[in-house]
Image (cartoon, rainbow, N blue to C red):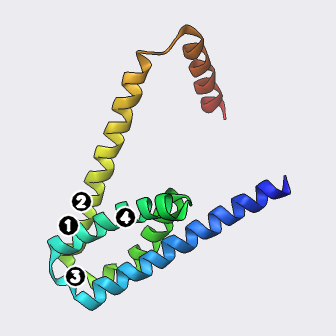
């Protein structure tokens, strides 16, 4: 139990650290290269940085990519925005919202496809889980 808690704390803190470290590097890159003046380049850089953060943290570091991307986004939201133009901020916000919308659609498409393969016992379990979620 203590070993498990220590592992969870280690994973969380290291993932948080990697995310914040990468966010700092991304903000420095935006500032030093003056990329904020080009709205397309800055929007693509910020979108690509989220994919890189996730893959780097999962593959190379063996930590949680989702936690790293979460904290990287929080840091970049506060410190990268001043380095973008007003149009660049709007374009980046629009691009990230559209990417999130498409990601949600793909997830629900896969869930819909998986429903076809559900057995009777799986459907009963799903109904009970939905009932408990609605009650709770």
Say which label, 3 or 4, has the lower sequence index.
3
The residue carrying pointer 2 sits among few (fewer than 14), some (14 to 19) or many (20 or more) residues within 10 Å by Cα, namely: some
The residue carrying pointer 3 sits among few (fewer than 14), some (14 to 19) or many (20 or more) residues within 10 Å by Cα, namely: many
Q: Nearer the viewer, mark 3 or mark 4?
A: 4
- Dots 2, 1 in contact, CB < 8 A: yes
Where is mark 4, residue-wise?
52
Q: Could you say whether the residue bearing mark 1 is in a helix, strand or loop?
A: helix
Question: What whole-number distance in Å separates the C-alpha atoms at marks 3 and 4?
Answer: 19 Å
Q: Could you say whether the residue bearing mark 3 is in a helix, strand or loop?
A: helix
Question: What whole-number distance in Å separates the C-alpha atoms at marks 2 and 1?
Answer: 6 Å
Q: Position of residue 77 (x, y in %)?
A: 39, 73
Q: Is residue 92 above or below residue 58?
A: below
Say which label, 1 or 4, has the lower sequence index.
4
Q: Which sits in the foreground, 1 or 130?
A: 1
Where is mark 1, residue-wise?
91
Q: Is residue 78 above or below residue 98?
A: below
Residue extending furthest top?
120
Residue drawn at 84 percent across, 57 percent down: 2
Where is mark 3, residue-wise?
36
Say which label, 3 or 2, has the lower sequence index.
3
The residue carrying pointer 1 sits among few (fewer than 14), some (14 to 19) or many (20 or more) residues within 10 Å by Cα, namely: some
Residue drawn at 42 percent across, 59 percent down: 55
Question: What whole-number distance in Å separates the C-alpha atoms at marks 2 and 4?
Answer: 17 Å
Where is mark 2, residue-wise?
95
């Amino acid at each position: 139990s203590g070993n498990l808690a220590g592992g969870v704390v280690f994973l969380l803190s290291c993932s948080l650290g990697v995310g914040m470290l990468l966010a700092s590097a991304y903000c420095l890159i935006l500032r030093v290269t003056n990329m904020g003046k080009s709205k397309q380049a800055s929007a693509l850089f910020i979108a690509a940085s989220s994919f890189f953060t996730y893959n780097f943290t999962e593959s190379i570091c063996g930590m949680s990519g989702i936690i790293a991307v979460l904290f990287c986004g929080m840091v970049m939201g506060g410190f990268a925005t001043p380095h973008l133009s007003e149009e660049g901020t709007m374009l980046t916000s629009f691009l990230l919202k559209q990417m999130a919308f498409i990601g949600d659609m793909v997830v629900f498409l896969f869930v819909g496809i998986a429903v076809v393969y559900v057995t009777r016992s799986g459907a009963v379990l799903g109904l009970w889980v939905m009932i408990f979620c609605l009650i709770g």
